[in-house]
Amino acid sequence: MTENTAVNPEPGEEFVAPELDADQAQAAAERLDALDDDLVAKRADALRAGLAEYDLDDEDLHLLEGVELGDDGVIMLPALPVLAIVGRPNVGKSALVNRILGRREAVVEDKPGVTRDRVTYKGEWNTRQFTLVDTGGWEPDAAGINASVAAQAEVAVELADAVLFVVDAMTGATATDEFVVKMLRRSNKPVILAANKIDDARQEPQAAELWSLGLGEPWPVSALHGRGVADLLDHVLTVLPEISAVAKEEVGGPRRVALIGRPNVGKSSLLNKAAREERVVVNELAGTTRDPIDEQIELGGRVWRFVDTAGIRRRVHLQQGADFYASLRTAAALEKAEVAVVLLDVTEPLSEQDVRIVDLVLESGRALVLAFNKCDLLDDERRRYLEREIDQDLAHVSWAPRVNISARTGRHLEKLVPALETALESWDTRIPTGKLNAFIAELVAEHPHPVRGGKQPRILFATQAATRPPTFVLFTTGFLDPQYRRFITRRLREVWGFEGTPIQVNMRVREKRQR
C-alpha cells in the first residue's frame, strides 16, 4: 500500500507502522478504486466461504447473510425494539436486568443510586431480540429525588418503544412512584408494571395492591430468584413492536444537529443567529436553557433541524433537580441527533469538561464538528496557547472538522455548513466488501501482525457491518493488539477520509471446527 514499509517487529515488541503522507494515501485510494469490482467481489466471496471451516455463532451467520444480500455487499438489519427499565432507587432494576439477560452484567448493590447512567444491553427471549436499557443517574440527595427519578423516566419514555416500571411490592407505592406515574400516564408509550420482590405465593396480595397506580395489571416477579420473570417477558413480547419505532433511522427530512457544550459557551446565541431571530433566551448567567429546543433553520441553502441543548455541568454541580434534568435532556438530544456541534470558548483554556463533552459524542457514535466560538475576541498570545491545548487535549479527534465562529456576530457562520456536510457524508459512508478485503489484504501483506506467543493472528474476512457510524467487523484467528487495531483505523482514515465521524473496528475471534 506504500513504499514506506516498516520493519516487522520481533516477537514481543510493540507494533509501530509508518503513517501515509497525503500523496501515498491518494495513491492507495486510487489503486483500490481502480480494482475490478467483479474480481474483488469474487475474492471476498471466496474468503467468506472459507469461514465455513470455523465455529460461527448465530450472530456471525446473521451478519454474514447480510454481507451476501446487499447491493454493495451489506444490508442494514432492522432496528431492535427498545425496552427501558425505570423505577426509584433500590427497587431491583439492575437485578431484574441481570435476570432477563441471564448473566450478571448490571452492577447490583443494596443501596440506592448505584446505577448512574443509562446502560444498554442486548436481550433475547423466545428467539426475539430487543434492546434493554437499565436506567439510573439520579442524585441520592433526598430533596431532589422525586424530580430526578421522574426526569430519568421521562428520558427513558422518550427513547424507548415500551417502559418496564419496577416497583418494590413489599414497600408499596411511594410518593416517588406516584410522581413517576403521573408522567407515565401522560405518555403514549406502553407501560408494563413489574411488582418486584414477590419471592413466594404468600406475598402476591402485596402485588395486587399496586393496581391502585392505574397502570394496569401488576406482574409479580422476584428478580432475585427469577420467579415470574418468564411470564413477564412473555407479556413484554406482546407489547414490543417487531421493529423499533424510536431506534430506526429516519429517511429524508432535515439532518439533525445537536449543539452541545458546557454552560454559557454560546449555544443559544448560535441558534438565535442561525435562526435570524431571538428563538432562545440568552443570558450571561449560565444555565438559562433547560430543555432542548428544536428549530428548523435554513443555512447554506439547506434546511437543518437544530437542537439547542442545556449546558452539560460537572457532576459535582448536579445538586439541583433542574440542572440534573437539563443534563439528561442533553444526552437525549444527542441520541436523537445525527451530528453534534461541540462549542468551545476560545477565550478560556480548554477544560476537562470540554474534553468530557467531546468524549460523550464519541461514545454516542454521532458525527462531530468542533466549533471554536468567540474567535473575534482571540489575540495572538491566546491563539498560540489554544493551538497547544488543541494538540494536547483534542489529539484523539484530530479528524473532526474545525470551524472558527462568532455566535454573537454571526462571523464565519456559513463555514458550519460544509463542515456539517463533510461529517455527515463520512458518517454515511459505506465501503463495498470486496474493496475492504482488498484493502486489508494489502495492509496485512505490507505490515503483518506481530507474532504473539508463537502464533500470528490472521484476518480471515472483513466487512462493514453498519454505517452511522461506520462499523467494521474483522473475523480473526486470534486477538489483534490494540496498536494494530488503531493502525487499521488510522489507515482507513488515510485512504477513505472519514473526516468528522468516529470509526468502530470490532473483532470476532473464531477457531477452526474440530474434525
Image (tube, grey):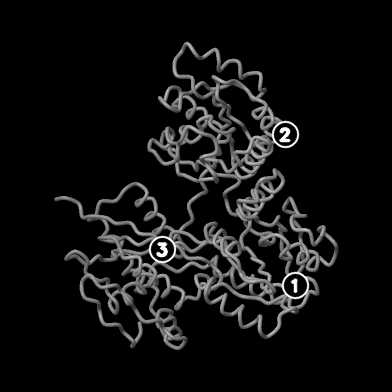
Residue type at tag 3: Val
Q: Earlier in the sequence, mark 2 or mark 3?
A: 2
Position of residue 450 in the picture relative to residue 208 (left or right) = left
Tell me where residue 50 appears, x and y as whole percent: 25, 61
Tell me where residue 100 appears, x and y as whole percent: 44, 34
Residue toward you, 491 or 344: 344
Which element is circle 2 on?
helix
Q: Residue furthest right?
A: 277
Residue 352 disc label: none
Which element is circle 3 on?
strand
Residue toward you, 290 or 42: 290
Q: Residues within 10 Å of mark 1 (few under 14, many from 20)?
A: few
Residue at horizontal 59 percent and vertical 33 percent from the top: 88
Q: Earlier in the sequence, mark 1 or mark 3?
A: 1
Quarter-wise, where is residue 168 in the image? Answer: top right
CA distance separating discs 1 and 3: 35 Å
Residue type at tag 1: Gly
Residue labelled with disc 1:
301
Relative to 249, residue 228 above or below: above
Residue labelled with disc 3:
505
Q: Residues within 10 Å of mark 3 (few under 14, many from 20)?
A: some
Residue at horizontal 57 percent and vertical 75 percent from the top: 389
Relative to 244, residue 217 above or below: above
Residue at horizontal 64 percent and vertical 44 percent from the top: 155
Position of residue 213 in the picture relative to residue 430 (left or right) = right
Q: Earlier in the sequence, mark 1 or mark 2?
A: 2
Quarter-wise, where is residue 118 in the image? Answer: top right
Closer to the eye: label 1 or 3? 3
Residue type at tag 2: Arg
